[in-house]
Image (cartoon, rainbow, N blue to C red):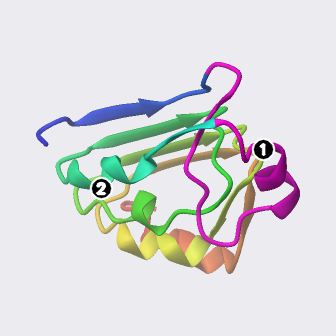
Amino acid sequence: PNLQQISVRDLDGGHKYSDGEDPDEGRAAKTANFITHDIEILSGFRNLRLLSLYIAPLNGRYPLLFQFPLLQKLEIDNCGNLKFDLEILAGLPVLEELYCNRNQSSGNINSLRVLKDT
């Protein structure tokens, strides 16, 4: 529970993380027989300072990924089926850096004001 950095990466073929809320149904059907890994285990690491998601096979919305009170840096790269609204960043009160590339994010750009020192 005292980890300060976690990186969630791509998995070998035939593996996936549990589907989130509002998943892409086509993707969920294609991966229905995959071995599923529980992404919710991350919620126990309340001391995270850095969370990196890179080509992670996430499908849908995962509010738990945006509820780390000490998170300072969030990197989300090439997670095409991960959905999130910028407003959810409010759950990261000390966020200083956000790197977001090739994802399904939406929302009000003013939500980025949550970033510290911007």
SS at mark 2? helix
What is the CA distance from the residue labelled 1 to the residue labelled 2? 24 Å
| Disc 1 packing (10 Å; few <14; some 14–19; many ≥20) | few
- Residue highlighted by disc 1: 102
Query: Measured from the top left, where is residue 6 in percent x and y?
Result: 35, 33
Give above or below for 13 relative to 4: above
Q: Is residue 25 magenta?
A: yes
Image disc number at residue 43: 2
Q: Residue at x 29, y 33 (%)?
A: 5
Residue toward you, 24 or 93: 24
Q: Label 1 amino acid?
A: Arg
Left or right placement of residue 4 versus residue 20 in this view? left
Q: Quadrant of residue 24?
A: bottom right
Camera-nearest residue between 116 and 9? 9
Outermost residue, top side? 12
Nearer to us in this view, 49 or 24: 24
Work out whether residue 38 or residue 68 is closer to the camera in this orientation and state it. Answer: 38
The kind of residue on which mark 2 rests is Ser
Say left or right for 13 vs 41: right
Task: Please report the bounds of the magenta region as a residue range.
Answer: 12-34
Label whose residue precedes the other's in the sequence (1 or 2): 2
Residue pictured at 38% horizontal, 53% vertical: 96
Q: Position of residue 73 (x, y in %)?
A: 40, 45
